[in-house]
Each structure stands twice: as C-alpha cells, then as structure tokens.
Image: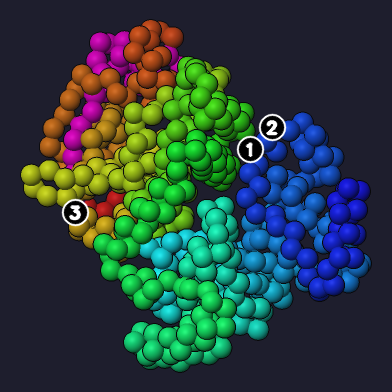
Amino acid sequence: MQIIRDILDEIVDLFPFPMVHIGGDEAPKLRWRRCPDCQRRMREQGIESEDALQRRLVLDIGEYLAKKGRRTIVWNDVLAGGLLPGHFVVQQWLGDAPLARAFMEAGGQVICSDTRHYYFDYPYGVTDVHAVFDHPMVPDYAVGLEENLLGVECPLWTEYVTNLDRASFMLLPRMAAVGLRAMGDDSPDWETFAARLRPVMARIEAATALRGAPEDFWRMAPGAAEADRAYWHALVFAQGAQPYAVYERQLVVLEKAERLMERIGMPREFLLRSGDAGMAMLAGENASDDDGALTLVRQLMKAVQNREEGPWADLPEDVWLSTTGAFARFVREHHRATGRYAFDRGFWTTRQVNAVLFRLGTLEYELLRDDDGPYMDLHIPSDADLTPGALNASVAEARRFLAEYRPDWAAAPIRCCSWLLSPALREVLPESSRILRFQAAFDLSEVEPADREYIPWIFNLTEAQAADCDVETLPENTSLQRGVKAMMRRGRHVGLAHGALARAFA
C-alpha cells in the first residue's frame, strides 16, 4: 500500500479538486483466482471472493483519500464486491445496474456514463445524435433517486483517435446534444431538437474552428449506420492491432465465463481447470481436452457472447442462470459416477448455449418444429422435483415465459421421450411412486422396450460406463435400482416411451 499512498500524496498536491478517480474497472480476476498470495489473504481476512478482495483495496484507498479531504470515484465494476460508503462516487458505465441502484438507495451518488449513449469513441453507427436525443437523461436505475444522480459524463477514449480533427468529429455534435438535454431541453420531437442544435454547433465551430460530424451522421439510416460500424470495426481490428485486440476481447469473454461458472455453482477445481484450458487456447497452445474442460469453456464463452449480443440477449436473468446451470450439474454428475470432475455432455449443451432449451422451474423445454409446426420436447433433469405442485408450476411458468419471449411456442404441444414414461416401470414401482404419477399426465404414442438410455440415469453412471456395464456390479441402493437390476437379470430392459402431455400432473 505504501507505493499507492505515495502516488496519491503527489496527486493530491498537484490537483486541488474535491474528487480523485482511481478506476477499478476491467480488472479480470483470472489471475487473482490462481494467485497464492491473493488466496492466502482472502483466507486470513475472511474475504469471500476476489471481487470482495478488490473492494478491500479500494476501501483502503478511499479511506486514505478521505483523510486528505477528497472523495473517491470508481467505476461501477467495484460494486461487484459489495456496496461502498458515502465518500465514494460510482461512475456507471456498463452492466450491474441493480447494484448502482442499491448504492443510490443507500445514499451513494452516481455519474451516468452509459456506453451505448455516452461513449463517444463509439461510432455514429452505434450512437448517433438522435440516440442521444431519444435517451432519457435519468436512467432506469436512478428513477426516483434523481437527487443522487450527479450528472452525465461522456468519455472519448482515444486508442483509435489519432488527431484533433478526428476527436472533434467524434465529440461534436454529440457532446453539444448532451449539453442541451442536460440543461432541460424540452423539444417535443427530433426536428425541433435538431433545429435548436444547429445554432449551438455554429457557435462552437466559430469559436474553436473545430468541425463536428455533418448532418448525415446525426440520424443515420440503417444502411449508413451499418457501413459506419464496419469502418469502425476495420479500424479497431486493423492488421497491426488485430492479434492484440482479438486476444484482449477474448480474455474478457473468458473472465465472464469464469464468473458465470461461479454463479451457477461450478466446482472450483473444475472452474480453474476450464479457465486454464481457455487461457492456453487463447495463447495458441495445444491443450488436451481429455476431461472436457476445453469444450466446456468454449461453450460457456459462446454462451456469454450470446447473452450480450445473441439469442440470450434480453431474456430474464433467472432463466439464463437456471438454464446454464446444467453445465455445473453435468460436471457434478460425472464426479458422482467416477470420483473425478469432468464434462462429457458437450454434444447436448449446445442447446443451452444457443437458447433453444430453457430450464423453467423444475423441467427443461426444448423448442423444436416439425411438419405440424412448433412443439416442445420436455426434458427431466436429474435434480427435478417430481411433485405435482412443482411440475404444474413449471408448465405454467413455461407458458408465461414463451408467451412473452417465444410466442410461436406459447400454446405449442409438449412432448416427451424418456425412460421415465416406460410402462415397464409399473412392474417395479408402487402405484404411489412419483414417477408413475408423472407418467399419468401423458398419452403414450410409442414404446421402445429394448432401449438402454435408462441405465446411466438410474444407476448414476456415465454413458461410457453404462455402455459396457456388468449387471451384477450395478448398485442396489434404492428400490428402483433393485427392481430394475432384477429385471435386467431376467434379460429385460426398462426401455423408453414417447408421449404427449395431456393433463395436469396429479
């Protein structure tokens, strides 16, 4: 800490301003999770997460600056480790808006720098002047807490700005438009606002000789906006910068994938192993995938990208987490079967990655089509609650979700193909069994009596173990296992059945 205090001492002496911005954003925890010193300090001080460890450092800096009469500004990323005291100001730029609101509700003050509307290094094809006009000055997270919103700040990061002309083109007239809006402009429509903006720009250009973007960029047509984004993308990924830019962005995606693994309860050992495989992949190394760690991390990185700008965008957070939770469940199932953490379901989880399968309550629903139109294929996770209340609640939740987000499937039929529907189970289970009560809600259309899909599920095996298992070595820990094992000894199988959900679960 001493070197940080020495630097802060110089900053405070040089700049007589009431606030000091110390950053705190874009601090990936990939290395922190693997750092022996970080992990030791977390254990010694009872710190639960790497985000909370960063918060501890930020708090120490903030306390030091407070003693010197300064407040501390940090980016909203720091709130991932917990709320901050009142001598901090949070600059909200990306994500975690609920945390910003919680900070404001506790009395904290926030600066709004929403990337989609106030980052002026983004091209006009992303944020034109009309987007600034159309965006509310009070963001959703600050509604009702306006007294704690200090205002708006519009960054222009200059990695790809090489001269003053380019800087003025990117800033103006967007910065002037924000100024008009911040001062309470009440233009009823875009045309009125643009008419008010023109003389402001004329005064700026006359006083500074700086030139802003021409009016073609103020409200861009879709084709022009796409071309502008393409130009910007080519600039960012220019040949010389491309390897670094791609690596940097993929490293951020990997960090988000590890964070997702934490949230869904991935066993720590396999989380780190998967992240290591991801880092090796990004470094161009040949990584073994014997345990499926590389497959898992690749899929979760794709899932993260789909969450930001793909089929998962704008879908509810709880559905996102419960659906991607399958990855952690499969890894735990493999450990239960073998004593070793591994991932062997990559052939299946592309459905979750691409948002064609959703866990809604206790069941999973895969959205499919055939010649008759849309239908849902019902899947029963190994941890499903088969009580009627939980099952009916799941179907109701699925109908509500689909009506809002996938209306083509809102009233679609629900089908199921599973060993759980097999009539053979009636020979080994009592009538009161939850499995048999589950079956009763379906009308069967086909039975496959010789199918062996049931073996890994009933006996807690991997598919590889089930493929060549010896009946005599199968466990007999439950009445279902004992009954099915006896059936297999007689040369018969549970098989599976196809059915359509025809009535409520009872």
In the rendered image of this protein, does residue 82 appear above or below residue 172?
above
- Residue type of the residue flagged with mark 3: Ala
Residue 250 visible in the displayed image: no
Residue 416 lies within the magenta run: no
Tell me whether the residue at label 1 lies in contact with that at label 3, contact meaning CB atoms closer than 8 angstroms. Answer: no
Residue 258 x/y as whole percent: 56, 39
In the rendered image of this protein, does residue 1 appear above or below residue 419?
below
Q: Tell me, what colour scheme is on the image?
A: rainbow
Query: In the rendered structure, which disc, 1 or 3, sits on the residue that comes first in sequence?
Result: 1
Q: Which mark is residue 30?
A: 1
Q: What residue did someone put label 2 on? A: 34
Residue 196 x/y as whole percent: 43, 90
Q: Residue at x 75, y 59 (%)?
A: 22
The nearer-to-camera label among 1 and 3 is: 1
Residue 398 x/y as whole percent: 32, 55
Q: Secondary structure at mark 3?
A: loop
Query: In the rendered structure, which disc, 3 or 2, sits on the residue that comes first in sequence?
Result: 2
Q: Residue at x 30, y 45 (%)?
A: 356
Quarter of the image for residue 279 reads: top right
Quarter of the image for residue 183 reads: bottom right
For the residues labelled 2 and 1, the Cα–Cα distance comes to 7 Å
**In the visual, does 151 lie left or right of 222?**
right
Q: What residue did someone put label 3 on? A: 412
Q: Alpha-carbon neighbours of circle 1 within 10 Å: few (<14), some, or many (≥20)?
A: many
Start and end of the magenta stretch?
474-502
- Residue type of the residue flagged with mark 1: Leu
Along the line of sight, the residue nearer the viewer: 318 or 277: 277
